[in-house]
Image (tube, rainbow, N blue to C red):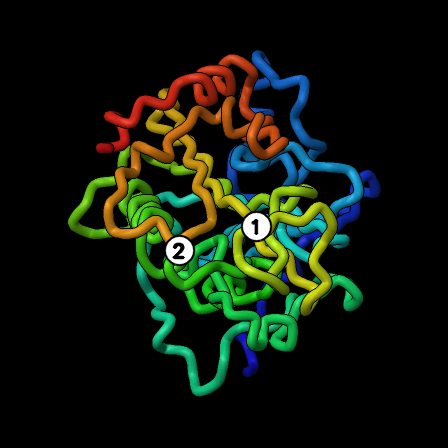
């Protein structure tokens, strides 16, 4: 299927940085030069506030479109070329990106899923790798989170944004409900007020050695080497880290879920952790571009009541 014309994303392999001449529309951490974070990422798109700290050796992409007359970032991704899976995806929801102008059902006949054309061919995932693997093609940046324009929605169907997920995990249960809650918290639902002006989001599945399943065998068997059955790793856990901003006030929360059928009886609060704890569980340094004092506040506090849980 032919997709609409998109901005070419930024791609670099750490520690080699290659920057485009475009400037991100978001105000970045340098707005707070009086209280910087010594651990922040290099300049450019990598310094957007939603970004975790980048790992040397991985690929970094920032996908953008032209929306309402300005460049708008769809999401950013850190991609592990050895595992051929995203380490995380990061994006924001605000009044600009929360609008609904496109529907997944509006795609023409054909499958909107496709290999990510910006990645080197040797590390891409395509249709063949997902054929008959008994898993859903689960979006990390949810397709419904990016319906403000057709071009942004097209980005979400790149296989670089897809992770193998059990149908019972992807289409019902706590993960499914959390993805709906994220849209509510971000203001994507007209009848529900957002909890802040901007919601910063990082999502992913665990792909470190020993933290993913071998899809060749029974689900639940954890292996220490990348699965080479169709070249796909299946995360053993999935996570979400969130930071809400309203004016100069920031609040954070995180969720960490086993990749399994959680059944019908569950409480979202059972999966709540602090962002500090999620950093220990995943080895990812979240929200490193915020000034240190704000980052510390976001990551140490995780009161579920603020989030309506």
Residue 79: % across, % down: 68, 51
Residue at 20% x, 52% y is 190
Residue at 76% x, 49% y is 12
> Considering only vertical position in the picture, is 171 above or below 264?
below
Q: Nearer the viewer, residue 202 or 98?
A: 202
Q: Nearer the viewer, residue 183 or 172?
A: 172
Residue 305: % across, % down: 24, 26
Q: Mark 1 points at which residue?
A: 235
At label 2, counting other C-alpha atoms closer than 10 Å, the crowd grade (few under 14, some 14-19, many 20 or more) is: many
> Considering only vertical position in the picture, is 139 above or below 15?
below
State left or right for residue 198 relative to residue 289.
left
Secondary structure state at the residue bearing disc 1 = strand
Q: Name the residue under label 2.
A: 169
State left or right for residue 223 relative to residue 184.
right
State left or right for residue 253 relative to residue 30.
left
Residue at 63% x, 31% y is 283
Extreme right residue here?
16
> Considering only vertical position in the picture, is 27 above or below 159?
above
At label 1, counting other C-alpha atoms closer than 10 Å, the crowd grade (few under 14, some 14-19, many 20 or more) is: many
> Considering only vertical position in the picture, is 170 above or below 235?
below
Q: Can residue 41 be seen in this view?
A: yes
Q: Which of marks 1 and 2 is nearer the N terminus?
A: 2
Secondary structure state at the residue bearing disc 2 = helix
- Quick one: quadrant of the C terminus? top left
Q: Nearer the viewer, residue 288 or 269?
A: 269
Residue 73: % across, % down: 53, 51
Tell me the distance, in whole angstroms, between the alpha carbons under discs 1 and 2.
12 Å
- Quick one: quadrant of the N terminus? bottom right
Residue 63: % across, % down: 59, 55
């Amino acid at each position: 299927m032919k997709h609409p014309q998109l901005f070419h994303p930024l791609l670099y392999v750490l520690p080699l940085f290659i920057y485009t001449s475009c400037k991100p529309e978001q105000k970045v951490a340098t707005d707070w030069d009086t209280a910087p974070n010594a651990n922040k990422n290099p300049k450019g798109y990598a310094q957007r506030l939603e970004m975790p700290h980048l790992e040397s050796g991985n690929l970094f992409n920032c996908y953008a479109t032209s929306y309402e007359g300005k460049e708008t970032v769809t999401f950013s991704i850190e991609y592990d070329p050895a595992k051929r899976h995203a380490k995380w995806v990061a994006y924001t929801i605000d009044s600009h990106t929360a609008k609904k102008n496109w529907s997944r059902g509006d795609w023409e006949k054909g499958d909107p899923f496709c290999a990510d054309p910006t990645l080197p061919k040797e590390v891409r995932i395509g249709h063949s790798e997902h054929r008959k693997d008994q898993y859903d093609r689960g979006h990390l940046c949810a397709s419904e989170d990016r319906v403000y324009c057709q071009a942004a929605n097209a980005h979400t169907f790149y296989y670089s944004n897809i992770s193998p997920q059990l149908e019972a995990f992807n289409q019902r249960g706590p993960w499914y409900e959390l993805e709906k809650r994220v849209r509510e918290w971000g203001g994507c639902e007209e009848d529900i007020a957002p909890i802040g002006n901007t919601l910063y989001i990082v999502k992913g599945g665990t792909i470190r050695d020993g933290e993913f399943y071998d899809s060749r065998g029974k689900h639940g068997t954890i292996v220490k080497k990348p699965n080479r059955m169709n070249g796909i790793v299946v995360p053993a856990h999935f996570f979400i880290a969130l930071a809400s901003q309203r004016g100069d006030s920031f609040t954070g929360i995180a969720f960490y879920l086993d990749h399994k059928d959680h059944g019908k009886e569950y409480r979202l609060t059972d999966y709540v952790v602090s962002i500090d704890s999620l950093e220990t569980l995943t080895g990812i340094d979240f929200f490193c571009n915020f000034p240190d004092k704000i980052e510390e506040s976001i990551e140490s506090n995780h009161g579920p009541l603020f989030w309506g849980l």
